[in-house]
Every structure is written in structure tokens, then in C-alpha cells.
């Protein structure tokens, strides 16, 4: 089995960390009043940033998702 290219692995880890952060925020934010309002905003931002990250990966450019907890290295 061939090993993935380094930029593919880098983008995959970045996307995984971003989506783990979004899932964590979606689970934890409904416990606050402001969080209930922010959840749709977070989902739209996640959708847009996922597209931007995919285009960046396709172009082999580096892209770091903002406000991401980097849990997986």
C-alpha cells in the first residue's frame, strides 16, 4: 500500500481537527443562550471553510482552518 503524499496527510489532519472542533461546539453550545443562536452560523462557516480547504488542497496550497483545536497530530 502506498503512503499518502505529505500535503494530503497535512490537509486530512487539518480537516479532521476542524470537524472535531465543529462537532464539539455543536454538542456544547446549546447549553448557553448565545450558543443556540451561534450554531447555524457555525454550520454555515464550516460549510464554506470546508469548500475553501478542499480547493486549497486541490491546488496543493497550505490552508489552516481558523479557531481549530488541533487534537490530532
Image (cartoon, grey):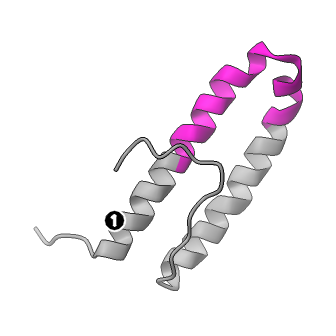
Furthest residue in direction top, as rendered: 31
Residue 31 percent coordinates (x, y):
75, 14
Specify whether 50 is left or right of 14: right
Q: Residue at x 62, y 39 (%)?
A: 22
Q: Residue at x 73, y 61 (%)?
A: 48
From this view, report whether residue 57 is shown above or below residue 29. Answer: below
Residue 51 quadrant: bottom right
Specify whether 62 is left or right of 36: left
The span picked out in magenta is: 18-39
From this view, report whether residue 65 is shown above or below residue 22. Answer: below
Secondary structure of residue under mark 1:
helix
Residue 60 percent coordinates (x, y):
47, 83
Furthest residue in direction bottom, as rendered: 59
The number of numbered discs placed on residues in the rendered structure image is: 1
Instruction: Answer whether residue 2 is magenta in the image.
Output: no
Locate the N terminus by quadrant. Answer: bottom left
Q: Residue at x 88, y 18 (%)?
A: 33
Residue 5 percent coordinates (x, y):
27, 76
Q: Residue at x 76, y 52 (%)?
A: 45
Neighbours of disc 1 within 10 Å: few (<14), some (14-19), many (20+): few
Residue 49 quadrant: bottom right
Residue 37 percent coordinates (x, y):
89, 30
> Which residue bears the numbered disc 1?
9
Instruction: Answer whether residue 36 is magenta in the image.
Output: yes
- In depth, the one of 51 and 70 nearer the eye is 70
From this view, report whether residue 58 is shown above or below residue 49. Answer: below
Specify whether 21 is left or right of 4: right
Amino acid at each position: 500500500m502506498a503512503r499518502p503524499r505529505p500535503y494530503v496527510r497535512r490537509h486530512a489532519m487539518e480537516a479532521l481537527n476542524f470537524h472535531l472542533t465543529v462537532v464539539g461546539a455543536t454538542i456544547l453550545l446549546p447549553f448557553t443562550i448565545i450558543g443556540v443562536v451561534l450554531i447555524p452560523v457555525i454550520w454555515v462557516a464550516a460549510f464554506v471553510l470546508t469548500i475553501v480547504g478542499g480547493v486549497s488542497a486541490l491546488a496543493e496550497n497550505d490552508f489552516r482552518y481558523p479557531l481549530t483545536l488541533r487534537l490530532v497530530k
